[in-house]
Image (cartoon, rainbow, N blue to C red):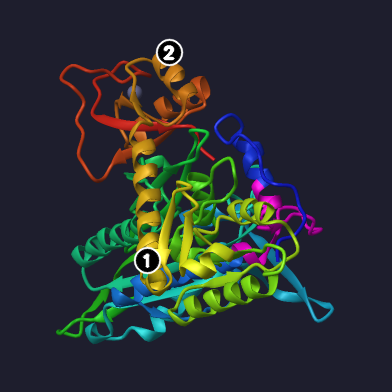
Amino acid sequence: MASLGNVFDVDKSKNFSEWYSEIIKQAGLCDLRYNVKGFVVFMPWAVASIKKMYALFEQELEATGHKPALFPAVIPEENFLKEKEHVEGFAPEVFWVTEGGGGKLEQRLALRPTSETAMYKMYSLWIQGASDLPLKIYQSCQVWRHETKATRPFIRSREFYWIEAHDVFATMREAEEQVRQDMQTTEKVMHGVLGVPFIYFKRPEWDKFAGAVHTFGADSLMPDGKTIQQPSTHLLGQNFAKPFNVCYADEKGKKQYCWQTCYGPAISRIYASVISVHGDNKGLVLPFEIAPIQVIVIPIPRKGVEEKVGAKARETAAALREHGFRAEADEGSATPGFKYNYWEMKGVPLRVEVGERELESKQFVVARRDTGEKTVVPEKELPKKIGELGKTLSENLRKRADEWFAKQIHSANSMDELSEQLDKGGFVKIPLCSVEMAGKNCADEIKSKTTGDVRGVRVDKPENPAAGSKCIACGKPAKEIVYVARQY
Ligand SMILES: [Zn+2]
């Protein structure tokens, strides 16, 4: 199975960008040669993990009362024009379909950049009375945005894969509760299972989703210290319900507009964080839950016992598959050492070595990808031990990432200090006059002087500026502690 490529060897801590490009190529995650700019082909080793990540999020959404649906990829322009801020925010990024069947279309169609204006059109038909609420629908699909920033596979491209959940409620209180639930879903899957740490920020007024009352974005960090926005959840209030007439008749028969939320985990982008945060100088390190192959069994043939060792490796992999693990035996012609390196580069969590000695002793050596640690396991205990080691490995990845993440939060009290801290990477806490529109000029000044973006106010724990502290841009009294970072 092992191909005869180069063994991975790039220093991630010194040159993350090169590391990322190399791992994409060598692990066979993307093919960048497709002939439309900003569009890439996702390859099987990546898609196998991405599908498992989809399943994790879908399972959690369904457990919290969401139902799946699939809406058309094209949105007529008339829908799109209904909410003013939304159209202003998205218009520059939309791909338009203008022709079909050899003729010009009567109305041009947007390739969905996000589906509010497709789904809410139908919601207005579906919701009549209070008994139709809450309505909680998600779809797993791809969206298209004509990005002008530099594209990077999985991180930013003109087509990406996500889930969008769009919920409707009778009251604002329920909508606010949903936003909290969306943040918990992110915590449970992205951090709890995939081991990617993040902080939820309430975005400043000037950086909200187009059409939202409030936006909450989960910001993670890449190994180069730049932040990357992960799942965001938006409180839409009645901003879409009014133009789309999403309403119900209350018990008195009076028309009431609904309250809405939307939540968008971009699965392909979360995959970028998973490979970047956990990977090392040998290549990928994949959490056990999403690894396309969880256990690779490597036969170590000696002269005269090749057949026996090969058969045992096959049998061991088959036995593990029967216990529900994704296990394969690599019986290719490469040397065991080459195979070790190859599967380590691909990020396979556990390796089982099968040699002549193992045949006699009925014990196997199991090696962990994250620590390199080896354990000797009696054959009959192998499935149980594989399950335990897989769990331990994922927990260790999360713990390691958390420890690293905790060290990436700094603080500053002046523009110079902020600039200096941002050069080290990570988040920098600063006092700011305001996160309402009044603070926008200060955020712009910070951006132009330091290239840092104001990410917002931390959601999980309130932080107040010390008495007498001043906005680092305008010098007025600071009302907020905000986090600044350079971003992807
Ligand atoms: Zn200010």
Q: Would you identify the image quadrant in which residue 439 lies?
A: top left
Helix, strand, or loop for circle 2? helix
Q: Can you identify the residue that label 1 sits on?
A: 385
Helix, strand, or loop for circle 1? helix
Indicate the position of residue 255 as horizontal and vertical percent values: 25, 78
For the residue marked with disc 1, what is the amino acid? Lys
Q: Is residue 415 left or right of residue 23?
A: left
Indicate the position of residue 80 as horizontal and vertical percent values: 54, 66
Indicate the position of residue 58 as horizontal and vertical percent values: 41, 73
Q: Quick check: is 33 in the magenta stretch?
A: yes
Q: Residues within 10 Å of mark 1 (few under 14, many from 20)?
A: some
Q: Nearer the viewer, residue 243 or 441?
A: 441
For the residue marked with disc 2, what is the amino acid? Asp
Residue span colored magenta: 23-46
Q: Residues within 10 Å of mark 2 (few under 14, many from 20)?
A: few
Q: Which mark is residue 228?
A: none
Q: Is residue 314 left or right of residue 338?
A: left
